[in-house]
Image: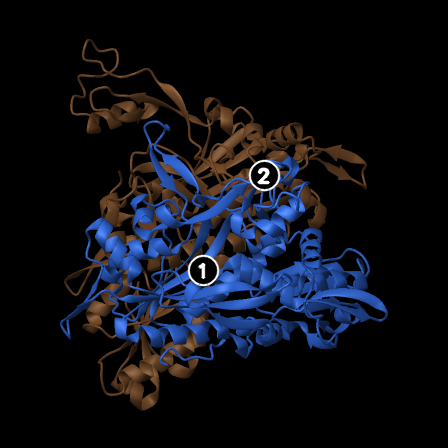
Chain colours: A brown, B blue
Amino acid sequence: MPDDVVTMDKIVSLCKRRGIIFPASEIYGGIANTYDYGHYGVLLKRNVVDAWWQAMIGDRDDIVALDSAIIQHPRTWEASGHLAGFTDPLVDCRTCGQRFRADHLDAEHDVRCPRKPSVLPGQGPDCNLTEAREFNLMFETTIGPVQEAGSTVYLRPETAQGIFLDFKTVLGFARRKPPFGIAQVGKSFRNEITPGNFIFRTLEFEQMEMEYFVPPDDAHRWYLHWLEARMDWYERLGIRGDHLRLRAHEQDELSHYSSATSDVEYLYPIGWQELEGIANRGNFDLTQHAQHSGEKLEYFDQQSGERYVPHVIEPAAGVGRATLALLCDAYDEDQIGGEARTVLKLHPQMAPVKVAVLPLVRKDAQPELAHEVRNLLRRRMQTEYDEGGSIGRRYRRQDEIGTPWCVTIDHQSLEDRTVTVRDRDTLTQDRVAIDELPDVLAGKLEAPWISPKLLVED
Amino acid sequence: MPDDVVTMDKIVSLCKRRGIIFPASEIYGGIANTYDYGHYGVLLKRNVVDAWWQAMIGDRDDIVALDSAIIQHPRTWEASGHLAGFTDPLVDCRTCGQRFRADHLDAEHDVRCPRKPSVLPGQGPDCNLTEAREFNLMFETTIGPVQEAGSTVYLRPETAQGIFLDFKTVLGFARRKPPFGIAQVGKSFRNEITPGNFIFRTLEFEQMEMEYFVPPDDAHRWYLHWLEARMDWYERLGIRGDHLRLRAHEQDELSHYSSATSDVEYLYPIGWQELEGIANRGNFDLTQHAQHSGEKLEYFDQQSGERYVPHVIEPAAGVGRATLALLCDAYDEDQIGGEARTVLKLHPQMAPVKVAVLPLVRKDAQPELAHEVRNLLRRRMQTEYDEGGSIGRRYRRQDEIGTPWCVTIDHQSLEDRTVTVRDRDTLTQDRVAIDELPDVLAGKLEAPWISPKLLVED
């Protein structure tokens, strides 16, 4: 791992210490691979989601939003292939009684089984592992008030299928013709055994998926467009270019229906891993749902008289993975005046709190003026007020959650109604008139980063 | 029902026609009481959620955000009482084979059973109903990769319990002392038989819940504070005062742990119904979780040396119910120049689209200028471009989704770079210079409504 990649331990520790993200149900001993987001985590995650919506429906004219249900009709998953094929191969160890993914067996079993490695499969009489069996990853539940009378349904393992189900309805009301997209953000669920890399893979997770419907002949061109547009988006969030890469799937990695897939990968503490997948799914999903439902899921172009099943390009991102990438990428440790500092160098637009308002001392009418300043700012951006502890300590607290600016109210503020604005990264302190402060800070926030490099007309 | 209350049929029809909200899984015949939100529905719902966050954490200093998992440790529901007591009494009809809520039996059975009313319970030999049995409303599923080896878990029936589980963690990192609140927005699930009133009650639904922790002696005062603050919020969303009321629960309606509960009720097409519940929950939840987990869930005041289990005031709102109330309240039909118009008179801040940009004709460089104007506006507010059909028809389309302003590019626009701004409600058209347009419209959007009537210091 390169030196400039933070360890996962440091990220986990910071997230716990500041209540950004922490294990769920901790008072009952926790629940496997499930996390709760605290105050700053919620704010950070909302910024990620807002930036995604801005890129999908704010900056473009060709995409509409959708929010489909988590529990859909069970035939959805017959048609999509998830019921038959969305499985992991698992083996049981008769020694330790634990279950492992067959494809991750060596590393995991090594750690968790007390008699490993002597029980490696096929290595003599100690071998105590069952054959691999396939287990479906969908959570199953029953709709209707009682099990025997109800019907089995599934928690969606991806948001994408809800988009395909509603393709015809959206086509009807949205007055769209291909190329156009349908975007959605929401939770999905996968009943997975995971190696426990913090929020990298969790049982429930929030997806940001967009299905872009195009004329079949244009599919490859749009696939290339989305590779570029999505890489551009992560760079605009402030993620270092040398920690991002595009990796095309090999032929043997591709789903049977996909003609091309690439991952946007980020250099996480656990190595290069998928941040987002961008797939050319062909017409597989619409064709499957048309067959299973008996509905025509196609586009008829009245002008050309052409009728076709659109092909689909799917950029599928994870809110948790993007959040984790931002945290890892922004994490830094430096020294100020001989003292160690932990700082999140988040892009200001991504920072949970934009500005902290701090009275230098808790007297001399400074707190009152600080509240007045805070009230000026709070409708323009997320603010925080803090009067507890030395000013240096309060700066450190803000640095640690990535707050780009600290506004300090001091003696002079009471005299001339100016404040100092401290910059998290440069540590410079500029004096600004209170009356001008909201516009000055709003101006800093409206950085050019947010404009996409690609024009939609491309 | 008063004349000024729209029928549910009209709301359902508009929502379907414009793709705002429609039944989920329609191509497979639908799934009971489950709906998907389309483009304008997502935008409207996001505005509701944003306004709630603004009221909870933007306008106040005493509340922090949380996003806890949907699937928590199963002991959560033992402690909360949901496992034992969150049930509906159901009866089966042996004639029609359907299941009914015992407490809604007459009305529902009347409609759906072919032999009703001759099979009313206790009315002679035709009676064909089973005794009522209690059925739990929680959706059950299994965690771990296979049913026999996994453990039973539940989809949360309310977001509130996740807040109580994290009380201690939040207290630790957030440097808070009572009174303070923890707020969260997320999906909950209830396996209910419902009478099918559109999105009023659905199997999965989004909640906006806040638990406000206070010293025991202050509980009643804060209960009254939240009654007023929440009523104020709905009024600020633009909902008519005479369609809103506060209704205190009678003693026999109260949960056993609640000393007082009031509902904010809205006059829906189905009558006065709960829009939000505000409960004084006492210390029931923290005490239960402390007992079941063995953790101390209390507050120790270092200054006074006092140690206590905080009491909790809970304002619990539903995103779907607030969205439905906004749609019903805003719906209007009028006549313009002898033609019927359907219009959603939504508050501009709530409207899915703030401004539509329309070239009068699709030639003479008007579309190009319209795109330029749209690009000026799109980073400030949600915009839409439309060039299809007559200008009157395009105005109607925007009226129907509640767009407060339509900007029209005409011949004069090409000459002097001015446009007309049409107001949805007054129908006036003002000419505005393109350069000034973003600030003019942003100024209209920043209405005083958004400021809370109550000061937090109250």
Q: Position of residue B232 (x, y in %)?
A: 49, 75
Q: Quadrant of residue B434?
A: bottom right
Q: Nearer the viewer, residue A335 or B322?
A: B322
Tell me the element at label 1. Answer: strand
Q: Earlier in the sequence, mark 2 or mark 1?
A: 2
Q: Quadrant of residue B138?
A: top left
Q: Position of residue A136 (x, y in %)?
A: 43, 27
Residue on which disc 2 sits = B128
Q: Is residue B44 left or right of residue A426?
A: right
Q: Is residue B290 left or right of residue B274?
A: left
The quadrant in which the C terminus of chain B is found is bottom left
Residue on which disc 1 sits = B208
Question: What's the residue type where badge 1 is placed?
Answer: Met
Q: Nearer the viewer, residue A299 or B341?
A: B341
Spatial CA distance of label 2 from label 1 is 42 Å
| Residue in view at x 34 percent, y 74 percent | B220
Q: Position of residue A56 (x, y in %)?
A: 55, 51
Visible residue check, residue A379: no
Visible residue check, residue A278: yes
Question: What's the residue type where badge 2 is placed?
Answer: Asn
